Every structure is written in C-alpha cells, then in structure tokens.
Amino acid sequence: MAHLRSRRRLGLAVPLVLSLTASLGFLPAGASAAPPAKPAVRAADTPSLAYVVNTRPDRRTIESVAKAIAAADGTVVIAYARIGVIVVHSANPDFSRAIRTVRGVQSAGATRTAPLTAAGATDEGPLQLMTRGQAARTTSAAAAADDSEPFEADQWNLRAIGADRAAKINPGSGRVTVAVIDNGVDDTHPDLAPNFSAAQSANCAGGKADTRAGAWRPYTSDDAHGTHVAGEIAAPRNGIGIAGVAPGVKVSGIKVSDPVNGLYYPESVVCAFVFAADHGVEITNNSYYVDPWLYNCMDDPDQRAIVDAVNRAQLYAQRKGTLNLASAGNSDHDLDSDAIVDESSPDDSTAVKRTVDPHECFDVPTQLPGVVTVSATGVQNLKSYYSSYGYGVVDIAAPGGDRLHQIPDTPSKNGRILSTVPDGKYGFLQGTSMASPHAAGVAALLKSHYPYATPDQLKALLRAEADDPGCPESYDQNGDGTQDAVCEGGKRFNGFYGFGIVNALDAVK
C-alpha cells in the first residue's frame, strides 16, 4: 500500500480510514447457504475458547447465524444485533472454519489463544505510591498557592496544558460524562466519588454488561490503572488531593479486564463501546490495546475478525455521538514505518516474534478510523522516550510523563503523573495511558462549551486548540550521539505530536 503511505506524508488524514474500510469492506459474506460441517469429535475435557462472529446487522441474518452457531456446537453469550457482532463460546476446535462457511457470516475468529479457564494497558513501569514525605512537601507548597489542591504542586501536567487556569474559567459541565474503559474505577475514592456516574458504569468482562452496584470497581487494590486514569480526567477541586483536567465533568467506569489474567479481550471492548453509546456517554478514554495481539493483521482470519468486531462497536458509538480517544502505545514504535518487530504477541499464551506492516496490521483501538490517537510528552513538551508515534497516525499529544529525561521542578521531582489510586491513595504512573485521559479531559471541556458538537467536530476542535512545538532539532535523549526516534513533518503537523499538544486554556476561551 505504498500509495496510501505517500498520501499520509502529504498530510491527508483519510488514507488509514480508507485502507481499513477497504480491508473490511470485502470480507466474505459466506461461501454457501449450507449448514456448517458436523462438529469435530473431541475429548470431553476440550477447553472452550471465545469467538466473535460478525454478520449483517439484521434480525433474520442474526437468527439464522445463531442457529448455525448452535449446530457448530457454539453457545451465544450475547448478540449485538445493531452492529452484527455475536459473542460465542465453543469447545469445538473446528468452530471457526465451520462458521465462516455460513451465509451471512462476514468474518469470524477466536478472540484469544488460551482457554477461557486458564495486561494490555499502556502505562509504562510500575505504580509508585506517593510517600508521606512527598505528600507533606507537596501540601506545604500548595498552601502557598491560592485555589490549589493539596497535592497540586506535583501536578506539573496541569500547568503544562493550562488546565489549572482553565478551571477558573470553565471546569466543565456535569452534563458531560467521560467513560474510562479500563480495569475498573474505585468510585469510593474521596477524590472521585463526587463526580462519578454509576448509572453509566458496568463490568463488561466477558462481553456482556453487568450493571450491579460496584461491578465496575477493580478486582483488587493493585488494579490501579483505571482509577488513576479517572482522576486525571475528572478529580474535582474539592480541597482533597489532586485536580483533574476537567474537574466539573462526570466520569464513569466500564471494566473490561479479564478476572483471571487482567487482559483486555475483544468481546469485552465491544461490550464497552456499545454500553457507553447506549448510556449517553459523550467521550470514552481507551488507555490500552486489545489483547492478545499488539497488532492485528488483516491476512489472519482470527485477527481480521477482531478488528472487524471492535471497529463496528466503536463506529456505532461514534454514530451515537460518542468521541473515542486512545493511547498511541509505549513501544516507541513508528506506526507509519515499513515494518515493526512484534515480540509480545499473543500475550495470553506463547509469544512468537514476527515482523508486521502497521498499514496492514493494526493496533486496536488506536488505529481504527475516527479514534483520536494520543502520544505522550514530558514537562519539556518533548515526546516521552517510550511513546509510539507516526506521521498521519498520531492526532494530538498530551502529558504522559517521562521519568528519565524530563524531570520537573516540583516538590517530588517526579516526571511521572500523579493521580488517584484505589483505597483513597495517590500514586505516580507514566505512559501514553496517562496522555490519553489528559486529551479526553480537554475534549470534555470542549463538549461542555459546545454541547451539540458531533464527534467529528470535537476532533477538529481538539486539533485546532492544540499547540504544536514542531519536530525537535535533535531527539538524542540519552546523549549517545544517535537519534532515538525520527520525527517527520513540520510545525503544523508531524509524527511526534500530530496537530500538537492539547491546550485546556485555549479550549475554554
């Protein structure tokens, strides 16, 4: 697809959408109307796998395919009729081959490589809890500042995008909700409870929404990722702890992590996008990649079905008025390069080293059409050392932290991002996982100011208010004389920052 790559270098935003649409648009509709082959004989203890079966989104087709699923010894977990995605469990090792021959099936494949009975989040490095000493120093510094939260002196990230000043103009509307699709949100945290929307929260692990009270909370206190993300977006200015980028908006939690291994499987993410859309969520934050494949290649029928299913769900959310943002990833990969070495997939069984073309093998949901892709920066407004990038792939950038090369002059001298973690605590994390919620917070401020803006209009506004520092003259972060990454493009648009670093203050003016 050399022609698509050359168009991306001219700054057109269309080619990825076209390439993905073209790839999905010619999925086989089924070779025959005959029923699937008789299930293969298997041992009684053959483990089950999960599958997505993608069909035309009409009642008759789905009913017909559901019968074929049963004939192939599959069990329907849930059918999302409006997007034509059916989540299935089956212990038949021949299930995929059999169901792909059924009329009306456009793609189908396994969503994991390990049995159901047996972490794909984009934070970089372990959680570092805030110590008592750090808290004391930060609180002391905050006491000297007016209208500052107790730990805000350590929040260099807010000042980097003008969010501290923006809050005095417009903290955001309580009519706007950002859903954190992640490993759960601890809504009992005192710095999250005031802005939490339980009515727009659920546990989608396994592909079917569980809305029982507290189902959206983390499985354990160690599952801090989603709670950290939620605080970055919407921790209120209530005199407790920290502040979020949009301290006046609502935040919800849609848990998608597997209870056994913590991975983010496709059927769970499909459920999350549909749930968010059907429950009036304006913005979703997606700080993860869909497991088990870091890149899903369109020439593999299973991976192709994963891309198809998740893309249908996120496009459905867009049509319902939801803007989706996603982190660019922490592999320092150039997503516009000719080839990327993936040594981590599949991550639920035995990884196999492979070389992929990121124009044919997609990071999901990061590279799906219409999704706002966010790279990470540090306190010096430089790309963070770990952040993936790519000309025509990255839309915008936002603070994600950099503990090695960009150290802030704050009480804790910590280049990571400080935010909420379970059990009423606070901690530092870094990653594109932390960048995406900053951008989501700015998007929420824009939605508060322009309540009738469509997802496409919000995306355009995000790009317009961003400040692009342009490609750095040198990106030799460790000083060894070698460029650590190559930034393509110019001042207005480039591979490191897309259209620029988000600016909360500009968003509310």
Image (cartoon, helix red, strand yellow):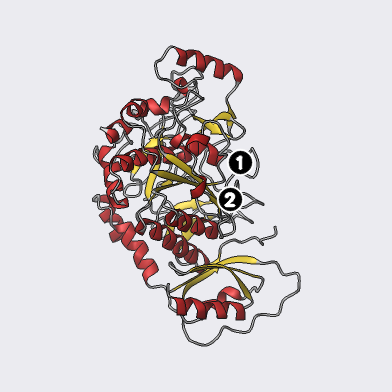
The quadrant of the image that shows the N terminus is bottom left
Q: Name the disc covering residue 223, or none.
A: 1
Measuring from the top left, give residue 508's x and y in whole percent: 29, 34
Q: In percent of the image, x 61 and y 49: which residue is there?
A: 262
Specify the amino acid type for callout 2: Ser
Relative horizontal placement of residue 71, taking residue 440 as reference (left or right): right
Of the two numbered discs 1 and 2 on the same chain, state the one appearing first in sequence: 1
Relative horizontal placement of residue 235, taking residue 336 as reference (left or right): right
Q: Is 327 situated above or below 369? A: above
Q: Residues within 10 Å of mark 1 (few under 14, many from 20)?
A: many
Is the C-beta separation of discs 1 and 2 under 8 Å? Answer: yes
Query: Which residue has dot 2 on it?
Result: 257
Q: In percent of the image, x 46 and y 79: which residue is there?
A: 61
Which element type, helix, strand or loop, lies under badge 1? Answer: loop
Measuring from the top left, give residue 357's x and y in whole percent: 42, 57
Q: Quadrant of residue 114?
A: bottom right
Q: Quadrant of residue 312?
A: bottom left
Q: Residues within 10 Å of mark 2 (few under 14, many from 20)?
A: many
Measuring from the top left, give residue 449's x and y in whole percent: 29, 39
Specify the amino acid type for callout 1: Asp
The quadrant of the image that shows the C terminus is top left
Q: In front here: 210 or 375?
A: 210
Q: Is 93 situated above or below 216? A: below
Measuring from the top left, give residue 154's x and y in whole percent: 47, 22
